[in-house]
């Protein structure tokens, strides 16, 4: 945190955030620690859960008076506004946390995170699934980024990916292949709603209903900001959806309008893109290519590319994500 500039915010992903306490607690700790720094770094907390009801409560940020037993009076004064019947997290803190719906089992992970806090979610998953999710955490973290698990959760056999301190630190190196959505041990796919209901059946607080569509739309925009840009394509390589800003990687071809991915690929992209998609189709596995050179404005940029086959759909579809290779860029600067 000490060497961060204003354009390099600390990126935190709180997974399985439930009603928001964990995310707001991290924002409080950050505010307290930052006081001792010469310059206050920026913080972006992205908090996700698959349960919409819990997410609405988390956004509302209103907690009963009994929290005074767990939260010090200093923190209550500094970070909360007292309202009738309880305390509401103040606006400054609320603005640092974005809540969005995301299913750990089936939605693509976010990327370039400094910290992933995933507490008391893995214990509810079958052991086989817990293991399968670790490569996704490795992918989502920056090198050296931290994984913070619950007291009774562990990285199981993935010691090669993380260095254990009190929390786990991502080791450098390639992320092993992983596929989403993950099947459960019986070979079926976990249903989001079922999971949400079995883990927590809390109801929305009074006055917090409605506005669902607007919130979903806001979530969609925020997810686009945090997730790497990409496209969803079908088996004929036709683009079904653009996700985020893809103009650094794709451009409309001259002549007849087309959504053909290969026709839209910028210079240098077409062959590696086609090879990665062919392999993902053949092996039905996620394929990742690093340091692919893409032409732009007369120069080239190093880009990482990932093709993820989406499995439990009627039509065969692939999610392709593009990401600037920040490590490689940093390497060049150091030399
Ligand atoms: C026991 S709570 C933990 C809450 C908080 N992290 C804590 O430690 O207090 C587990 C949370 O994980 C969420 N969850 C369960 N399965 C999930 C999945 N596949 N993707 C995202 N969130 C999930 C549940 O909705 C619930 O809010």
Image (cartoon, helix red, strand yellow):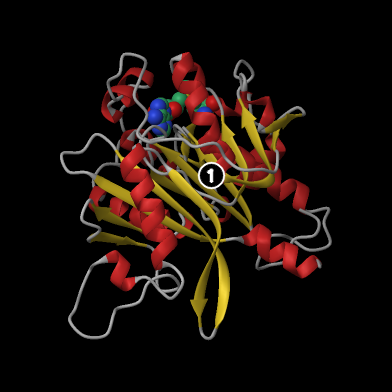
Q: Quadrant of residue 148?
A: top right
Q: Which residue, given by chain and number where applicable, does mark 1 sit on?
A: 89
Left/right of residue 25 with respect to residue 235 in the rendered view: right
The residue under the point 44% across, 32% down is: 18
The residue under the point 27% across, 55% down is: 233
* Residue 11 x, y percent position in the rendering: 60, 51
Left/right of residue 179 with respect to residue 324 in the rendered view: left
Q: Is residue 123 above or below residue 270?
A: above
Q: Is residue 97 above or below residue 257?
A: above
* Residue 239 x, y percent position in the rendering: 25, 61
* Residue 178 x, y percent position in the rendering: 46, 35
Asked if one can make out residue 143 in the rendered structure from this viewpoint, the answer is yes
Query: Where is the C terminus found, in terms of image quarters?
Result: bottom right
Asked if one can make out residue 202 in the rendered structure from this viewpoint, the answer is no
Assign ligand 1 to one image quadrant. Answer: top left
Counting every numbered tag in the picture gives: 1
Callout 1: 10 Å neighbours few (<14), some, many (20+)?
Answer: many
The residue under the point 83% across, 53% down is: 36
Q: Quadrant of residue 146?
A: top right
Is the shortest distance between ligand 1 and the CB of mark 1 under 8 Å?
Answer: no
């Amino acid at each position: 945190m000490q060497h961060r500039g204003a354009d390099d915010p600390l990126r935190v992903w709180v997974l399985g955030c439930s009603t928001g306490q964990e995310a707001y607690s991290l924002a409080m700790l950050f505010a307290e620690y930052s006081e001792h720094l010469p310059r206050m770094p920026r913080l972006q907390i992205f908090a996700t859960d698959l349960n919409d009801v819990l997410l609405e409560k988390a956004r509302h940020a209103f907690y009963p008076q009994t929290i005074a037993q767990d939260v010090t009076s200093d923190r209550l004064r500094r970070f909360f506004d007292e309202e009738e019947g309880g305390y509401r997290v103040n606006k400054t803190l609320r603005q640092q946390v974005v809540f969005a719906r995301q299913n750990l089992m089936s939605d693509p992970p976010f990327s370039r995170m400094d910290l992933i806090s995933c507490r008391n979610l893995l214990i509810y998953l079958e052991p086989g699934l817990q293991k399968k999710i670790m490569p996704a955490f490795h992918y989502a973290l920056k090198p050296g980024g931290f994984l913070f698990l619950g007291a009774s959760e562990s990285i199981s056999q993935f010691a090669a990916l993380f260095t254990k301190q009190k929390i786990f630190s991502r080791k450098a190196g390639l992320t092993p292949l992983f596929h989403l959505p993950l099947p459960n041990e019986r070979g079926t796919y976990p249903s989001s709603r079922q999971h949400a209901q079995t883990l927590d059946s809390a109801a929305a607080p009074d006055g917090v209903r409605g506005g669902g569509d607007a919130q979903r739309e806001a979530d969609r925009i925020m997810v686009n900001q945090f997730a790497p840009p990409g496209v969803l394509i079908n088996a004929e390589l036709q683009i079904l959806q653009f996700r985020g800003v893809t103009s650094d990687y794709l451009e409309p071809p001259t002549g007849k309008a087309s959504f053909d991915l290969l026709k839209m690929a910028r210079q240098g992209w077409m062959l590696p893109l086609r090879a990665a998609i062919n392999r993902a189709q053949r092996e039905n596995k996620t394929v990742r290519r690093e340091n692919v050179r893409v032409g732009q404005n007369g120069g080239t940029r190093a880009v990482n590319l990932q093709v993820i086959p989406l499995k439990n759909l009627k039509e065969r579809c692939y999610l392709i994500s593009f990401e600037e290779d920040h490590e490689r860029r940093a390497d060049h600067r150091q030399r």
